Amino acid sequence: MVPKSSKSAFGRLTDLVKWVDLLIEVCDARAPLSSRHPNTSTLFGQKPRLIVLSKADLACAQAAKEWLAYFRDHDQQTAFALSFKTASGKDRLLAAVLKATTDQRQKMARKGLLPRPVRICVVGMPNVGKSSLINWLIGKNRAKVADRPGVTRAPQWIRVHPQIELLDSPGVLPNRALDENTSLKLALLNLLGENSYDQEEMARAALLRFHNKQVEQLESYFKNDDDISLESLAKRRNFITQGGKLDTRRAAGAFISDLREGKLGKVMLDSLP
Ligand SMILES: Nc1nc2c(ncn2[C@@H]2O[C@H](COP(=O)(O)OP(=O)(O)OP(=O)(O)O)[C@@H](O)[C@H]2O)c(=O)[nH]1
Ligand SMILES: [Mg+2]
C-alpha cells in the first residue's frame, strides 16, 4: 500500500525543523515501531530528540516499558510512555526537555543573546496525538484535536512553559510504500486515512494475524466462541442486512472500533526485534 502523502508537507517540515532546538517524536504506544516515522534520521539528522509513546492508557504497560528500554539501549534515545487522558508525567517530560536543551540554552547565554524559550517541534504520523500532547502540557485545548488523521493543517507555535515553545505540526506519512503488516497495524490504529483500506478486509486480516498472538484477548472478546470470525460476531450482535444475511461489514466496523477504544483490552501490536 502506498499511503497518500504529500512530499511538500515533508519538505515544509524539514525546513521548519532546521530552526528548532529539539524534536519530540510521537509514536503510538500500541505499535511503537510501526508508528515511528521511518525516515526521521535522514530527515532530521542529528537533531536532539525525545520519543513519546502516546495513548499508553490503551497499550499493554509491560510491553510498552520494554519498548522504552529498547529505545534507550538500541537508539540511545530517552523515551516516555504517556497518556494524555491523565495528568501524570508532565513534570517528568518538561524536566527531560529542559535537560535535553541545556547545551543550547548555555550557548545562547555565552553568546550574550537575550534568553528565548527553547523551540521544540512535535513530529509524527497523523493521528498519533501530537496536538493532544501540547494541550495536555498546557492544560487547555489550544491545538485542534479529533480522532481522524489530518486534523492539524498548518504548523502552530504554542508556549507550554516559560522556557519552552512547542510547534504543533501536521502529521506526515512516509512517502514510500509500507509493507502489508505495517499498513495493517497503522490502519487498525486509525493512523491512515479511512480511504486507504477496506474495513472488512482489514478486520479479517487482523483476526487472522492476531489469533496466534493475542489469543486470550480475542477469546474473551468472542466470549470463548470457537468461531473467531466476523460471521460469529455478526450473529451474536444480531447484525443482519436488509436481505436477511449476516452483516459482516457492520461486524467489521464494530470490531475495529472496539479494538481502537480498548474494548479488547490493552494491546501491543509490535514485537521487539
Ligand atoms: N486514549 C487516548 N487517546 C488519545 C491520547 N492522545 C490522543 N488521543 C486521541 O487521539 C486522537 C488524535 O489526537 P490528535 O492530538 O488530534 O492527533 P495528531 O497527531 O495531532 O493528529 P493530526 O493533527 O491529524 O496529525 C484524538 O481522538 C485524541 O483524543 C491518549 O493519550 N489516550
Ligand atoms: Mg494535530
Image (spheres, rainbow, N blue to C red):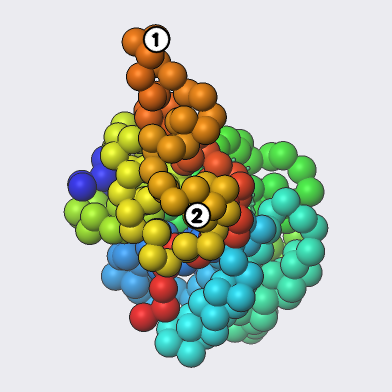
Identify the element where label 2 is drawn: helix
Name the residue: 36% across, 80% down: 273
**Direction bottom: furthest residue:** 73
Residue 229 position, x and y percent, is 39, 43
Tell me the crowding category of disc 2: few under 14, some 14 to 19, or many 20 or more residues within 10 angstroms, Cα based. Answer: some
Residue 261: % across, % down:
59, 44
Q: Residue at x 67, y 76 (%)?
A: 96
On the question of residue 111 being in view, the answer is no
Residue at horizontal 28%, vertical 58%? 181
Return the residue nearer the eye: 252 or 74: 252
Residue 242, disc:
1
Q: Is residue 247 left or right of residue 103?
A: left
Q: Is residue 96 above or below residue 224?
A: below
User: Could you tell me the amino acid type at mark 2?
Assistant: Leu
- In the rendered image, residue 176, in percent from the top left (x then y), is placed at 20, 54
Q: Nearer the viewer, residue 58 or 169?
A: 58
Judge whether 91 appears above or below 66 on screen. above
Q: Quadrant of residue 180?
A: bottom left
Provide the residue designation for mark 2.
218
Tell me residue 235's x, y (percent).
46, 30
When the figure is inspected, residue 206 is found, relative to residue 112, above or below; the finding is: above
